[in-house]
Amino acid sequence: MKRTLMALALLTALAALFFGLAPLVGYRIFNLGVFLLLLYGVGVILLLIFWDAFPDMMFPGYPKEQYLWWRIVRGVLAVVLVLMVAGGSFLSVLMFRAGKMNPPPKGEEPTTVVVLGCLVRENGPSLMLRRRIETALGYLRENPEAVVVVSGGQGEKEPMSEAQAMEEYLLENGIEQGRIYKEDRSTSTRQNVAFSAEIIRAEGLPARLVMVTDSYHQMRAGIYARTEGFEEVYACSSRCPWGLLPAYGVREMLAIGQAVILNGGSLW
């Protein structure tokens, strides 16, 4: 039993290291999610190495029975790691449900598409932003009655606002100017939703929302949308590169905690 548990722990550690290194090696991205995955992987491996060996290695010749403090420390660390995995698994299920199992219903009732911004590079939208715009474009073409709010301000290293980059892309691909509303002040997901809500209400746009963003991001977008008073919130998710999904997902879990604990949101 002990060997089985240690083998499972090692597998989770190796998986964490793999998905922590993938963004660094493949995309040169380092964020909090990458750091936490690497920290978890290294931490579990060190704990497994020192689980029984620590007293003999550091204090040779002394009776193991005297090292009650180490048994307590390693037990606490193990419980913390188990809770991290359990909490992460629980949130992963909720995030998957929000991103993949909440599609907009088909019908004639009009909707407002809200596209959440992402990084704009010197040569145009980043990969993740481009995929969000392409996803929104597909939905808008299939639903000609829908209007869209493109949401995202301009960061210090961005040549233009994220909203402008999205607007230009939609216009170039045949979406009429009259269907596009631009929100270019926001610098966070919370502001994306709050400032978009102001435009929706000021312009009398449909209150049935279709959020366009990456699947891991949909849960938090929905939390903020419900906080703003919207009751019908659906997800139209873009495809995130598989190598980035775990790291961004882990980082998103912390942001969801902030949305619920500090900003008064709800998981349900």
Image (spheres, rainbow, N blue to C red):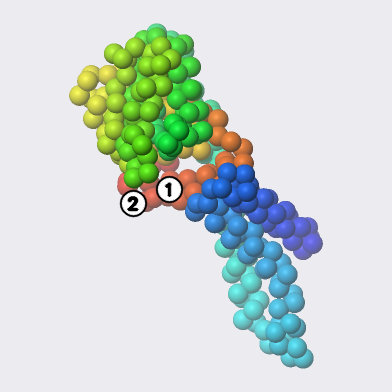
Asked if the residue at tag 2 contacts the one at tag 1, i.e. Cβ–Cβ closer than 8 Å, the answer is no
Residue that extends furthest to the left in the rendered view of this protein: 202
Q: Residue at x 37, y 44 (%)?
A: 157
Residue 224 visible to the viewer? no
133 to the left or right of 250: left
Total numbered badges shown on the rendered structure: 2
Helix, strand, or loop for circle 2? loop
Residue 53 visible to the viewer? yes
Which-is-in-front pick, marks 1 and 2? 1
Residue that extends furthest to the front in the rendered view of this protein: 123
177 to the left or right of 202: right
Vertical order, 21 against 56 (above or below)? above
| Residue nearest the viewer, comparing 130 with 200 | 130
Q: Residue at label 1?
A: 255
Q: Residue at x 60, y 74 (%)?
A: 73
To which quarter of the image does residue 62 belong?
A: bottom right
To which quarter of the image does residue 38 belong?
A: bottom right
Helix, strand, or loop for circle 1? helix
Mark 1 surroundings: few (<14), some (14-19) or many (≥20) residues within 10 A? some
Work out which quarter of the rendered image holds the N terminus and state it.
bottom right
Mark 2 surroundings: few (<14), some (14-19) or many (≥20) residues within 10 A? few
What percent of the width, then of the height, locates residue 226? 34, 34
Q: Residue at x 38, y 28 (%)?
A: 165
| Residue nearest the viewer, comparing 100 with 143 | 143
What percent of the width, then of the height, locates residue 164? 33, 28
Q: Residue at label 2?
A: 262
What percent of the width, then of the height, locates residue 15? 68, 50
Q: Residue at x 77, y 91 (%)?
A: 61
117 to the left or right of 88: left
Vertical order, 110 against 163 (above or below)? above
